[in-house]
Image: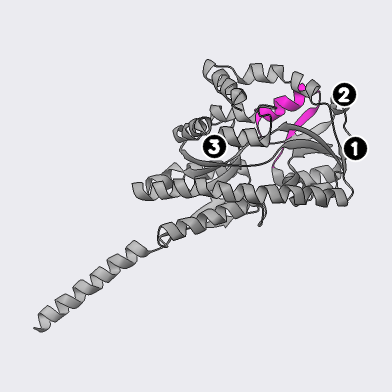
Amino acid sequence: MLHISKLTAATFAFGALLVGIANAETVLRSADTHPDGYPTVEAVKYLGELLKQRTNGRYSIEVYHSAQLGEEKDTIEQTQTGVIDLNRVSMGPFNGIVPETQVPSLPYMFRSVDQMRHVMDGPIGDQILKAFEAHDLVGLAFYDSGARSFYNTKKDITSIADLKGMKFRVIQSDVFVDMVKALGANATPMAYGEVYSALETGVIDGAENNWPSFESAKHYEVAKHYTTDEHQIVPEVLVMSKASWDKLAPEDQAIVRQAAKDSVVKMRELWDAQEKKSRDLVEKAGVKVSEIDKQPLIDAMKPVYDKYLSTPELKDLAARIQATK
C-alpha cells in the first residue's frame, strides 16, 4: 500500500513538472534602436502583451530599445544567427540582403503615407515579407517611419541647387548613398547613434529622417533647418529569427504572425500622434521649416531607378506599387 502511495505521489509530481514546463514563460528578445516610448518600441511591447494573452502566458517579449543590443546592421546579423529573436529595423539596412526591399526604399516610390500603407498591407507587402525567409529571417509586419526629409546645420534648402556639395548622413544602404549623390550632395553612411555628435562637430552638414526621429534623437538642437522634400516614405519591418521561429509550434507561429499584424494598428495610431507632436516641438524650439519644389528631385532619380530596378521582377514590383491607388 505504501509502495502504491509513493508511486502515485511520484506520478503526480511528474505530472506537475510537465504542466510547469508546458506553462513556463519563454521571453523573446526584441531589438530597436529607438528610445523607450517611441511608436515602434511601444508597438512591439503591445505585440508582447497580445502574445502573452493569446498563449496563456507561455510567450512574452522583452524590448531592448535605445540600441542596447547594437545598431541596426549589427542586430540584423544577430537576428539571422538567432542571438536576437525579434528585430524592428528600417527597410534601408536590408537593401543589401533582401533585393525586394530596395524597391519600397527608392526615393519617391510612394505618393503618400496612405498609399504606402495600402500597398504594404496587401499582396505586394506579403510578397516582400516572404522574401526574408531565404535569408534566415521571417518577415512579420510593416511599421511606419513617415516621410524622410533633409535637415541641416547650415541654411534653408528651397531648391535642388541648395543641396549641391553638402555632406549628409545616410543609412548604411547603397540606395540612400546613390540618392544623395543624384541630388548633387555628398553621402556619409553612418550609424544612427553617431549623428548628433557629427552634426555638432561639423563632420556632416546634415542628415535625413522623419519628424519623430529628428526630435527624439535631439538632432533639432544642432540642426535648425528642416526641408519637407519627403524624398522617401520607407516602411520599417518587424522580423523574427528563422532559428527562433522554427522552435515554435505551428499554432504558435500563427499566433505570432496574427499578433504582429494586429500590432500595426496600434503602431500607426501612436505614429500619427507622435509625428504631429514632434513637429510642433521642434518648431517651437526654433527650427525653420522650408518647402521645396519636389519635381526636380523626382526627375534626378532616374539613374537611381535604372540601377536598382535591374531585373524584370524588380521593375514589375515597382510598377505594381506605383499603380496601386
Q: Report the residue that reaches farthest toward the left.
A: 1
Q: Position of residue 310 (x, y in %)?
A: 58, 17
Q: In front: 314, or 293?
A: 293
Q: Residues within 10 Å of mark 1 (few under 14, many from 20)?
A: some
Residue ID at (20%, 74%): 10
Q: Residues within 10 Å of mark 2 (few under 14, many from 20)?
A: few
The residue singled out by tag 1 in the image is: 154
First in sequence: mark 2 vs mark 3: 3
Disc 2 element: helix
Q: Report the residue that reaches farthest toward the bottom.
A: 2
The residue singled out by tag 3 in the image is: 121
Q: Is residue 193 visible?
A: yes
The type of residue carrying mark 2 is Ala
Q: Position of residue 15 (x, y in %)?
A: 24, 69
Cα–Cα span, label 3 and label 1: 39 Å
Residue ID at (65%, 32%): 173
Cα–Cα span, label 1 and label 2: 14 Å
Q: Is residue 188 magenta?
A: yes
Q: Position of residue 237 (x, y in %)?
A: 57, 40
- Dot label at residue 264: none
First in sequence: mark 3 vs mark 1: 3
The residue singled out by tag 2 in the image is: 161
The type of residue carrying mark 1 is Lys
Task: Give left or right: position of 188 versus 114.
Answer: right
Task: Give left or right: position of 90 versus 285.
Answer: left
Which contiguous range is marked in magenta? 171-191
